[in-house]
Image (cartoon, grey):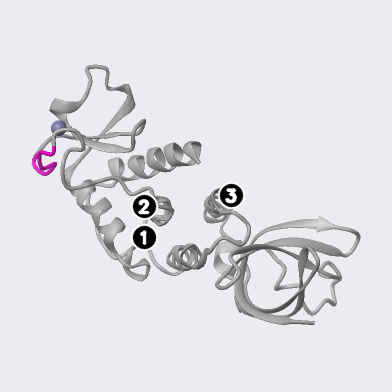
């Protein structure tokens, strides 16, 4: 039996048989995997904590035919303060649903794991606007998946975007200057230069530093995060 050591966080758990669970783990080495947690529902199970939603652990797994099974697990972080905060937990459900829908089994998800861990760490420990944190997560997630729009010049006429009225076209995932937009503005959202600079920072920055910027007016930034991720999700 080959034992495999991985670090992973539970992004979904479902009941399987009387005492078992199937958990979806986002791991550092194996990507996203389904894993059977035998006996995990028993109160005296050694993997009771490891198999719960949002618990991050170091696991020793083995593979048998189709599934991975947990041999042992050691908790790294339970993110306890997030589990008791209903508003934050609700947002995190949305994030894990999104991760689940945009990743395939066994795809390399190491960076997505890092981003998700950083995101929930910031949500738990730092006093930041959680909707801004969520918007940053969503933007960076789709950037990691290869959907970064061009952010320096208008994608139609190549004029610099700065000091222009800037529009984001969510139908084509492009930034445009006002001259290049159509009369019917329903497919665009208008964004400020400060928001554009923030988006540029998120695209270019290392995952560890992606939350390190301040933005005074966050309304159009949050709107961009939502619109961008909705548009990208529907295109996947
Ligand atoms: Zn233009």
Q: Which residues are magenta?
A: 158-163
Give the mark, 2 or 3, whose residue is nearer the N terminus: 3
| CA neighbours of label 3 inside 10 A, class few (<14), some (14 to 19), many (20+) | few
Q: Percent position (x, y) of residue 201?
A: 25, 58
Identify the residue under disc 3.
97
**Is 148 positioned to the left or the right of 95 in the image?**
left
In terms of secondary structure, where does tag 3 sit? helix
Residue 35: quadrant of the picture: bottom right
| CA neighbours of label 2 inside 10 A, class few (<14), some (14 to 19), many (20+) | some
Identify the residue under disc 1.
128
Q: Percent position (x, y) of residue 85?
A: 56, 58
Identify the residue under disc 2.
132
In terms of secondary structure, where does tag 2 sit? helix
Q: In the rendered image, which quarter contains the N terminus?
A: bottom right
Determine the residue positioned at 27% across, 17% down: 184
**Is 145 positioned to the left or the right of 77 in the image?**
left
Select label 2 or label 1 by which is in front.
2
């Amino acid at each position: 039996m080959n034992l495999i050591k991985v670090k992973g966080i539970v992004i979904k758990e479902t009941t399987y048989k009387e005492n078992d669970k199937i958990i979806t783990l986002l791991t550092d080495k194996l990507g996203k995997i389904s894993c059977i947690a035998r006996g995990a529902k028993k109160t005296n199970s050694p993997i009771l904590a490891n198999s719960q939603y949002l618990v991050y652990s170091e696991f020793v797994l083995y593979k048998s035919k189709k599934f991975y099974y947990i041999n042992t697990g050691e908790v790294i972080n339970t993110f306890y303060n997030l589990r008791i905060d209903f508003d934050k937990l609700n947002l995190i459900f949305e994030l894990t649903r999104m991760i689940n829908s945009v990743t395939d089994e066994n795809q390399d998800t190491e960076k997505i794991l890092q981003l998700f861990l950083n995101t929930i760490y910031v949500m738990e420990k730092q006093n930041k606007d959680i909707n801004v944190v969520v918007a940053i997560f969503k933007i960076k997630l789709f950037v990691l998946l290869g959907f970064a729009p061009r952010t320096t010049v208008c994608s139609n006429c190549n004029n610099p975007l700065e000091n222009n009225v800037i529009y984001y076209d969510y139908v084509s995932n492009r930034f445009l200057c006002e001259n290049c937009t159509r009369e019917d503005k329903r497919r665009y959202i208008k964004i400020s230069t400060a928001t554009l600079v923030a988006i540029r920072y998120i695209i270019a920055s290392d995952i560890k530093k992606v939350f390190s910027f301040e933005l005074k007016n966050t309304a159009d930034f949050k709107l961009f995060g939502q619109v961008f991720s909705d548009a990208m999700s529907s295109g996947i």
